[in-house]
C-alpha cells in the first residue's frame, strides 16, 4: 500500500488547501535527496517479495465462505515477534487496505547467492503457517487475488451492511461496508473518502459480464444504458484485491533506471501469465485480471481532468488514473521509445531542471506530481526538506504504477531500488515462489547479457489491455521486441552467438540490423514509426517465454543459459528447474492460469445455472478446494502439473554459504 505515516488525518478541505504546499516541498525533498545520493555506488543485489493474503472464514453447516475482518488482531500478534527481535524474525507483517487482508514479507531481504532461490518458497510456507497457527479451525489464510463474492450480501464475518446514505461513511458504497476497510490505521479510510471527494462522485468500476445462455440482463446494479456491466462503486473492490510484488536493490542509480525500463515491457506479459481474478461481486466477467479494477477504484480525476468537461477549475487533462501503467522510460537510451505525450506541470519540471535533475528524471517526477495529495496528517505538514522525504513519498506512494522507481530513504543503508508490481497473487506457495524467482533471475540475465526488451510505451499500454482479456495467456498476442541484444557488432546485420561474450547462443541466422544503431528520433510523435515492423512483432505468451525457432530465444532458455555459466548447488538447481518448467507449461497453455482454472471450476459446478452467477455454494466449494491445494492435500494437475515438490529449505546450508563466500554470484 505504500507509506504509512502516523498521525491525525486532515479533512479533505484541509488537505486540498495544502496540495501546493505538499507539491512544493515534495519536489524540493526529491532534489535534496537526489544530490545527496546520486553518486552512491556499490550496493549489492538485495531483493524481496510481498505477498498479500485474505483471511477466509467457512460456515461448513450453511456452506458459506466469508472474509474474516480480523486483520487488526492478527497483526497485533504477528508483530510481537518483530518488536521483540527486529533483526531476527523470519517474516514481517503489515496491514493492507481490507480489514480481512494482511501483507507478509521476508524478515530480511534475499541476496546475491543463487542458493537464495531455494529459500523463497520455504519462507512463504513459513509465513502461511505462522498465520494459520493464530486462526480458528474454520478459518484459512489464502493467497488469492480476489474474494469471489466481495460486495455480495453478507460477505463479511461478522456480518456488516453498507450504509450509502450515511454522510459519515468513507465509501458511501452500495455494496462494500466501511467496516471492511482496515481500521487500525487512518490512512485507508482517509484515502477512500478523499479520492471520492476529489473526484466529485463515487468511483465507477465497470466490467463486462461473461454472457452465458441464461445470463439475465440488465445485470443487477448495472448503469443506465449499460445492461451488461457489473458495476463496482468503492475503492475496496480494487484495493481489496491481493497481489504479488517484488523490490530489487540496484548497485547505483543508473542500474536502477535500466532495470525500471527493461522490466516495464514485461509487466503486461507477467500480468497475463499470472491472471487470477475473473469473478467480481459474485459474477463471472470478461476480465481475467485485477488491474483495471484497481485503476478505476482509485481514479480521483475530476470530470474536467477526464475530459468530460472543459478545463476551468483544473489545470490539466490527465489520460490515466493514478494507478496505471508507466508513461515513460527513464534511461537516455530508452527515450526514443517514449512515444506517448507525458503530462506534467511546466513549472515543476523547470524547477527540477534548475535543481540539477536531468530531463528524463525531471519529467518522471513532474509527471508524478500532477496528482494532488489525497491523504495528509497534521503532524506531517511542516517538515525539514533537508532531512525528511515524507512529502515526496506522499505523492510517490499514491502513484501506483506497474513499476516504481524508489530513491533511498534518508539516513538509511538502503540503496536505489525498483519495484515490480503487476503480478496477481497465486494460490500456492510454489506458484508465487516460481514467479518471484523467475523475475529476479530475469533481472540478472538482463544485466549480464545487456539485453534490450524496450518497445514503445504505446505498445506497452496496448499490451496492458490485452493482458486482462479472458484467457489472454492462451488466446492473445502481445507486442514484443524481435532482437533483444543491446549492442550489435554491425549496423547492417549480426550473428548473436558470434558477438556474445557470455556464451549466449540464440541462433546462427544473421539478423537484420538492430534498431539501436539508428540514431533517429523516437517513434510516434518523433517520426520513428516506419521502423516498428522490423523491431517488434506480435508474439504469443508461449513464444515469448519458450522461444521461436531460429528467430527468438525465449526468456526461459535465456535464464537456463545464464544458469549454466554459474555455480549452482544441486538442490537449488532442482528447485529452479521445477519453477522454469512450470512457467514454460503455463506460458504454452499446457497448464491453466489461475483465472482460467477458476472459470472452469464455476462452469463445471453442479450448482451453476449458466447464468454468470457465482453462488455462495460455488464460492464455498472453490475456496475449500483452494485450501486443500495450499495445504498440499490435493494436486490439481491442470493448474500445477504433476511435479511441484521442490527441495526448498528454510536457510542456506552453511557449507554452501562458506564455499561461495557471498561474492561470486552477487551480480
Image (spheres, grey):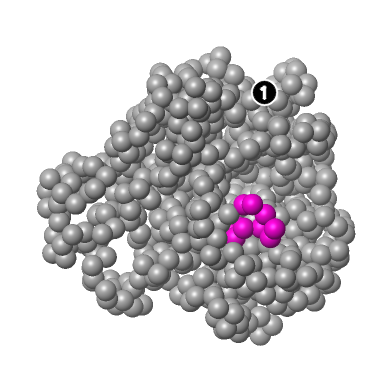
Q: Residue at x 59, y 35 (%)?
A: 144
Q: Position of residue 337 (x, y in %)?
A: 36, 67
Dividing the picture into quadrants, the one containing residue 32 is bottom right
Highlighted range, magenta: 400-414
Which residue in the protein does label 1 denote? 129
Q: Could you say whether the residue bearing mark 1 is in a helix, strand or loop?
A: helix
Q: Is residue 450 visible?
A: yes
Q: Judge whether residue 408 is colored magenta.
A: yes
| In this picture, residue 379 sits left or right of residue 82 | right
Q: Is residue 159 visible?
A: no
How many neighbours does mark 1 have within 10 angstroms: few (below 14), some (14-19), or many (20 or more)? few
Q: Quadrant of the C terminus?
A: top left
Does 66 sit above or below residue 543? above
- Single out the residue that lies furthest toward the top: 633
Q: Position of residue 400 (x, y in %)?
A: 60, 57
Q: Residue at x 26, y 59 (%)?
A: 487
How many numbered marks are there? 1
Amino acid at each position: 500500500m505504500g507509506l504509512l505515516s502516523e498521525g491525525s488525518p486532515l479533512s479533505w478541505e484541509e488537505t486540498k488547501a495544502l496540495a501546493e504546499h505538499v507539491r512544493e516541498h515534495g519536489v524540493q525533498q526529491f532534489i535534496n535527496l537526489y544530490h545527496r545520493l546520486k553518486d552512491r555506488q556499490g550496493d549489492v543485489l538485495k531483493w524481496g517479495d510481498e505477498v498479500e493474503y485474505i483471511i477466509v472464514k467457512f460456515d461448513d453447516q450453511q456452506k458459506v465462505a466469508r472474509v474474516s475482518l480480523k486483520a487488526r488482531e492478527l497483526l497485533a500478534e504477528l508483530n510481537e515477534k518483530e518488536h521483540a527481535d527486529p533483526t531476527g524474525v523470519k517474516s514481517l507483517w503489515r496491514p493492507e487496505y481490507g480489514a480481512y487482508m494482511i501483507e507478509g514479507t521476508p524478515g530480511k531481504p534475499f541476496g546475491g547467492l543463487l542458493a537464495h532461490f531455494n529459500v523463497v518458497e520455504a519462507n512463504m510456507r513459513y509465513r502461511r503457517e505462522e498465520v494459520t497457527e493464530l486462526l480458528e479451525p474454520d478459518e484459512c489464510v489464502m493467497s488469492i487475488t480476489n474474494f469471489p463474492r466481495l460486495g455480495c450480501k453478507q460477505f463479511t464475518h461478522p456480518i456488516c451492511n453498507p450504509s450509502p446514505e450515511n454522510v459519515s461513511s468513507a465509501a458511501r458504497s452500495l455494496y462494500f461496508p466501511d467496516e471492511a476497510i482496515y481500521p487500525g490505521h487512518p490512512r485507508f479510510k482517509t484515502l477512500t473518502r478523499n479520492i471520492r471527494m476529489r473526484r466529485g462522485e463515487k468511483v465507477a468500476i465497470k466490467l463486462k459480464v461473461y454472457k452465458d445462455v441464461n445470463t439475465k440482463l440488465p445485470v443487477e446494479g448495472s448503469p443506465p444504458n449499460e445492461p451488461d456491466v457489473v458495476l463496482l462503486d468503492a475503492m475496496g473492490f480494487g484495493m481489496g484485491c491481493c497481489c504479488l510484488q517484488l523490490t530489487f536493490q540496484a548497485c547505483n542509480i543508473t542500474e536502477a533506471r535500466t532495470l525500471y525500463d527493461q522490466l516495464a515491457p514485461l509487466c503486461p506479459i507477467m500480468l497475463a501469465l499470472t491472471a487470477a481474478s475473473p469473478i467480481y461481486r459474485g459474477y463471472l466477467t470478461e476480465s481475467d485480471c485485477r488491474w483495471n479494477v484497481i485503476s478505476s477504484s482509485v481514479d480521483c480525476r475530476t470530470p474536467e481532468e477526464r475530459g468530460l468537461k472543459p478545463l476551468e477549475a483544473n489545470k490539466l487533462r490527465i489520460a490515466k488514473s493514478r494507478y496505471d501503467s508507466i508513461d515513460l522510460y527513464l534511461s537516455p537510451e530508452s527515450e526514443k521509445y517514449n512515444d506517448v505525450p507525458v503530462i506534467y506541470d511546466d513549472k515543476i519540471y523547470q524547477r527540477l531542471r534548475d535543481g540539477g535533475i536531468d530531463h528524463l528524471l525531471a519529467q518522471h517526477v513532474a509527471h508524478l506530481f500532477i496528482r494532488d495529495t489525497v491523504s495528509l496528517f497534521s503532524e506531517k505538514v511542516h517538515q525539514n526538506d533537508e532531512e525528511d522525504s515524507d512529502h515526496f513519498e506522499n505523492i510517490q506512494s499514491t502513484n501506483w504504477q506497474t513499476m516504481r522507481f524508489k530513491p533511498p530513504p534518508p539516513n538509511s543503508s538502503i540503496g536505489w531500488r525498483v519495484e515490480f508490481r503487476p503480478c496477481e497473487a497465486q494460490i500456492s506457495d510454489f506458484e508465487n515462489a516460481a514467479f518471484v524467482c523467475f523475475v529476479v533471475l530475469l533481472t540478472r540475465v538482463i544485466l549480464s547479457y545487456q539485453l534490450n526488451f524496450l518497445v514503445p510505451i504505446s505498445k506497452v499500454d496496448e499490451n496492458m489491455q490485452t493482458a486482462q482479456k479472458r484467457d489472454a495467456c492462451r488466446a492473445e498476442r502481445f507486442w514484443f521486441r524481435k532482437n533483444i541484444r543491446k549492442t550489435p557488432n554491425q549496423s547492417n546485420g549480426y550473428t548473436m552467438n558470434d558477438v556474445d561474450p557470455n556464451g549466449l547462443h540464440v541462433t546462427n541466422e544473421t539478423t537484420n540490423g538492430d534498431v539501436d544503431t539508428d540514431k533517429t528520433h523516437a517513434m510516434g510523435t518523433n517520426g520513428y514509426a516506419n521502423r516498428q515492423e522490423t523491431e517488434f512483432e506480435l508474439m504469443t505468451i508461449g513464444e515469448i517465454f519458450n522461444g521461436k525457432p531460429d528467430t527468438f530465444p525465449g526468456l526461459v532458455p535465456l535464464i537456463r543459459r545464464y544458469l549454466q555459466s554459474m555455480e549452482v548447488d544441486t538442490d537449488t538447481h532442482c528447485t529452479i528447474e521445477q519453477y522454469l518448467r512450470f512457467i514454460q507449461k503455463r506460458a504454452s497453455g499446457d497448464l491453466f492460469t489461475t483465472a482460467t482454472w477458476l472459470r472452469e471450476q464455476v462452469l463445471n459446478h453442479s450448482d451453476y445455472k449458466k447464468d454468470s452467477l457465482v453462488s455462495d455454494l460455488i464460492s464455498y466449494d472453490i475456496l475449500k478446494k483452494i485450501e486443500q491445494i495450499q495445504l498440499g492435500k490435493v494436486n490439481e494437475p491442470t493448474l500445477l502439473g504433476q511435479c511441484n515438490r521442490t527441495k526448498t529449505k528454510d536457510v542456506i546450508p552453511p557449507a554452501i554459504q562458506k564455499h561461495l563466500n557471498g561474492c561470486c554470484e552477487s551480480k
